[in-house]
Image (cartoon, rainbow, N blue to C red):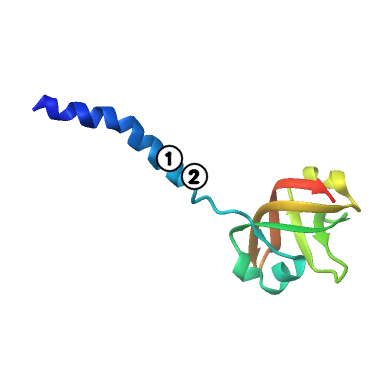
Amino acid sequence: MRHYLKPINSLLPVLLTALVLDGCEHVDKPKQASLAMLTENAARYDKTQVTTRGIVRRFEAPLHYWIEDEDLHRVEVFPHDRVALFLDETVLVEGHFRFSYSEGRRLTLTKIKRE
């Protein structure tokens, strides 16, 4: 009976590698969305990874940072210490977008760079 296990044992590493690689292909790429799209259709993008661009702004009390476009579509950006370095600059951001009626539109950064 053990002679049947040898082919299975030798295939196990190959099968595990194939499963891992197959899983990697299903990682969602960030959705590109303008700030207008994120503000007008916030619920549609809730809990998704997005890429967008805007100018970094801040308000002091309570301290918070957001990005906005020329039409004042806004999304708050976290963490504050990462986005603060880009105040008044146009940036391209990637992150996890969340929307709720109580907390508004929020993006937690995974990437940020100057445009």
* Residue 83 pos. (x, y %): 80, 47
Residue located 60% across and 64% down the image = 46
Q: Position of residue 35 (x, y in %)?
A: 76, 66
Q: Position of residue 45 (x, y in %)?
A: 62, 65
- Marks 2 and 1: in contact by CB < 8 Å? yes
State the CA–CA distance, disc 1 to disc 2: 6 Å
Q: Residue furthest right?
A: 88
Q: Residue at x 43, y 40 (%)?
A: 20
Hey, what amino acid is under mark 1? Val
Q: Element type at marker 1?
A: helix
Q: Which residue is mark 1?
A: 20
Residue at 86%, 47% in the rendered image: 86
Residue 69 relative to residue 16: left or right: right
Q: Residues within 10 Å of mark 2 (few under 14, many from 20)?
A: few
Q: Amino acid at mark 2?
A: Cys
Please tell me which residue lies in front, 87 or 27: 27
Q: Residue furthest bottom?
A: 40
- Residue 39: which quarter of the image? bottom right
- Residue matched to label 2: 24
